[in-house]
């Protein structure tokens, strides 16, 4: 009898504990009169200081972000997807634009932000064209977290030493690279992980923008003559010694600082990282737009990378997170953000402190520029995964481009057949 | 004054619990452990098995696809590379960390202050695998510490791309794992050597055995039980190698240095192909369990025949 009683007590206690564990209400209650704490999750762990600055900026508006940063993309993706299967849905979280955002929108994980976008466009806080990356079935989801142009950074001392001019055409750029190689300097940085696709993006877009855009919707094959030509140009540049060995894993900003490489095709977020190692823009380094490969093209082809800040549908503080998103789009928030990150903002009224950054923004965002989504965000996830592996191997071995293109196309065929 | 007499009932031996009561109270003690193992091991295993027959991207619900993931897995040349690399790791781990551990233990056995001699080999074992990966990738990166040292000394090899070229990158990673693992194997073999009785060894010496002959004919057979454990652990450990590779090449460039554990992780969490990842996980589990059973059976059969 006693045994039975003990067992029953243990079982009931266990069940009670389990129920307690399941019924947590997700931390702070919304609608606090003082300040609302919003649970915020991101894969950008290194950006925590900037989000601390944003907490200072949002103090008067009554918002505080409770920051949780992941530094591993795979672990972060898995966390977010799993979190939405529980009662602890993230209030606010960062993601990627493109097909992977479409995936989580379709799964009902993201709260719509259509009204916020309408208001922001009416107030002139954001250009209407930017909404395309955030629109699914006529509704907008998330707001832009960051807005980055991909441009060329160069070491000014090296340019001065070899008497080089800032290039405005592809031929001039290649001419500069040849001069540097002849003098034993490595012209360009590149990597075989994370950013292994960027030179493919730059060369193909500057050669045939239509083919570049067609890769994103399956209308262009990876074995299309333009794509093959772009890969061949890249292959020849590697053969000519224009790139640093991808096995060099020193930080990119340090490579530019020490002159290990003379130029670096990168997102404008590099400005902040160069500032962190005390490099001064327009003194130590300069920035210029990537010239078109094909001189016949009428407009300059520019790549933009934009990442979303999303509100979790059904999260504990959904309303507060939506209010925060509306505040985020405004001038005050964006000026604070641009200053903290040392980067630019999607909001044209936000002040960009760095003069070189302000100049390049004006140069690539005005008339005569054609803006395209970065390859990573533009490409469906399964195709991108294979492409990243193939480009990584190509950067490493500089072997025959055709094998890599056929491998990516095989995955693209499988993907588009399923759609 | 008389002492109170104890009641008769108190003097009788306590009634023995019935079989049912005995079983119930045993079950009460065992239940928490069984429950814990079931919740954290068996249920996930059953779920993983089920997921391996579905297509699932982590969102929505899994869709039943039968053996499709297994077909895709064996048709993928990258998967075959992953199996090849895993075999490299198994052979390499048995040959290097275990072999080197045995060598260190044997050479230092009977030395005064043997512990001091073994200590430097043991220290890396305290470092986590990911940290080992980070340290060694700094040493082995192209034009990194090793290449610079070789160039400075005028030795060949400074032009090698240690972490980029296949299968060189897998071999140098096995080298890094050896740096980490040899010490603990030396420690285990050292304990084994100390537990060998002195008399038979002395008798063999009297008979004229010495050096390698003595080791081959006497020490090695008497070390067999411990060798079984060390090699068994090495096989299982190497089959699921992950951390050192993740810290050094992440299975790249491309996918040339992946092992089965990395393939499982990448398919699941990087490619969001949870079904395919689960199929790889199941394959790895079956291989590990089979390898352990086959190896241990053989070893135990051998030891019974001694």
Image (spheres, rainbow, N blue to C red):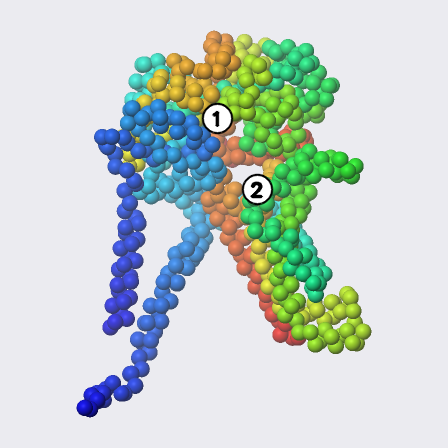
Q: Quadrant of the N terminus of chain B?
A: bottom left
Inspect this view and state whether residue A96 appears.
no
Residue A410: assigned label: none
Question: Where the C terminus of chain B falls, by quadrant?
Answer: bottom right
Frontmost residue, B77 versus A144: A144
Where on the picture, by quarter, is residue A70? top left
Q: Secondary structure at mark 2?
A: helix
Side of A380 where B236 appears, left or right: right
Q: Is A3 positioned to the left or the right of A176 in the image?
A: left
Label ID, residue B247? 2
Disc 1 target residue: A378
Q: Is residue A138 above or below residue B199?
A: above
A123 lies left or right of A242: left
Q: Is residue B238 visible?
A: yes
- Quadrant of the rendered image containing residue B201: bottom right
- Residue at image location 43% in from the left, 43% down from the top: B56
Relative to A1, residue B167 above or below: above
Q: Chain of mark 2?
A: B
**Image coords of residue A135 (percent x, y):** 37, 24
Measured as percent of width and height from the top left, residue A410 is found at 56, 34
Mark 2 vs mark 1, CA separation in Å = 29 Å
Q: Nearer the viewer, mark 2 or mark 1?
A: 2
């Amino acid at each position: 009898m006693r045994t039975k009683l003990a067992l029953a007590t243990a079982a009931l206690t266990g069940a009670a504990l389990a129920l307690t564990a399941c019924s947590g209400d997700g931390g702070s209650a919304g609608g606090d009169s003082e300040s609302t704490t919003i649970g915020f999750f991101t894969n950008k762990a290194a950006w925590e200081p900037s989000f601390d600055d944003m907490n200072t900026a949002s103090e008067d508006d009554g918002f505080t972000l409770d920051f949780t940063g992941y530094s591993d993309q795979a672990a972060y993706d898995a966390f977010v997807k799993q979190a939405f299967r529980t009662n602890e849905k993230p209030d606010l979280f960062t993601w990627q634009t493109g097909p992977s955002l479409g995936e989580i929108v379709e799964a009902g994980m993201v709260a719509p932000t259509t009204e916020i976008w309408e208001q922001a466009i009416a107030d002139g806080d954001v250009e209407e064209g930017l909404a395309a990356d955030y629109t699914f079935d006529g509704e907008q989801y998330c707001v832009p977290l960051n807005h980055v142009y991909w441009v060329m950074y160069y070491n000014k001392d090296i340019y001065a030493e070899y008497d080089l001019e800032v290039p405005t055409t592809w031929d001039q750029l290649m001419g500069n690279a040849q001069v540097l190689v002849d003098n034993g300097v490595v012209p360009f940085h590149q990597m075989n992980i994370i950013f292994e696709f960027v030179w493919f993006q730059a060369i193909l877009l500057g050669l045939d923008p239509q083919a570049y855009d067609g890769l994103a919707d399956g209308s262009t094959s990876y074995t299309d003559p333009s794509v093959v030509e772009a890969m061949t140009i890249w292959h020849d540049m590697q053969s000519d010694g224009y790139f640093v060995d991808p096995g060099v894993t020193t930080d990119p900003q340090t490579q530019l600082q020490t002159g290990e490489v003379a130029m670096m095709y990168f997102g404008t977020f590099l400005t902040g990282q160069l500032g962190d190692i005390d490099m001064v823009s327009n003194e130590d380094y300069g920035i210029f737009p990537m010239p078109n490969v094909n001189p016949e093209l009428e407009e300059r082809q520019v790549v933009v990378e934009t990442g979303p800040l999303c509100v979790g549908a059904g999260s504990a503080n959904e309303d507060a997170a939506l209010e925060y998103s509306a505040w985020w789009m405004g001038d005050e928030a964006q000026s604070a953000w641009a200053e903290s990150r040392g980067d630019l903002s999607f909001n044209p009224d936000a002040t960009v402190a760095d003069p070189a950054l302000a100049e390049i923004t004006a140069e690539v965002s005005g008339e005569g520029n054609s803006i395209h989504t970065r390859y990573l965000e533009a490409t469906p996830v399964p195709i991108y995964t294979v492409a990243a592996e193939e480009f990584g191997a190509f950067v490493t071995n500089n072997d025959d481009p055709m094998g890599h293109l056929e491998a990516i196309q095989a995955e693209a065929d499988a993907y588009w057949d399923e759609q | 004054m008389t002492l109170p007499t104890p009641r008769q009932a108190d003097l009788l031996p306590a009634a023995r619990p019935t079989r049912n009561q005995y079983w119930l109270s045993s079950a009460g003690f065992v239940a928490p452990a069984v429950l814990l193992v079931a919740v954290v091991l068996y249920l996930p295993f059953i779920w993983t098995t089920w997921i391996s027959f579905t297509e699932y991207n982590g969102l929505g619900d899994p869709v039943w696809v039968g053996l499709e993931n297994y077909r895709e897995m064996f048709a993928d040349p990258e998967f075959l590379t992953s199996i090849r690399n895993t075999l490299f790791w198994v052979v390499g781990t048995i040959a290097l960390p275990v072999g080197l551990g045995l060598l260190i233990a044997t050479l230092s056995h009977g030395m005064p202050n043997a512990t001091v001699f073994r200590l430097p080999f043991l220290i890396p074992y305290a470092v986590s695998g990911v940290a080992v990966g980070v340290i060694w990738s700094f040493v082995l990166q192209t034009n990194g510490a090793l290449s610079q040292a070789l160039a400075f000394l005028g030795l060949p090899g400074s032009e090698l791309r240690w972490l980029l070229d296949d299968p060189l990158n897998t071999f140098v990673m096995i080298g890094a794992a050896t740096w980490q693992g040899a010490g603990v194997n030396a420690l285990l073999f050292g304990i084994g050597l100390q537990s060998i009785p002195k008399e038979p060894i002395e008798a063999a010496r009297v008979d004229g055995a010495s050096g390698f002959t003595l080791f081959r004919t006497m020490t090695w057979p008497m070390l067999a039980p411990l060798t079984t454990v060390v090699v068994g652990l090495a096989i299982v450990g190497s089959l699921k190698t992950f951390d050192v590779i993740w810290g050094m090449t992440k299975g790249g460039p491309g996918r040339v240095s992946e092992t089965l554990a990395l393939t499982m992780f990448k398919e699941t969490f990087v490619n969001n192909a949870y079904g395919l990842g689960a199929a790889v996980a199941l394959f790895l589990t079956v291989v590990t369990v089979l390898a352990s059973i086959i190896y241990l059976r053989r070893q135990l059969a051998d030891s019974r025949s001694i």
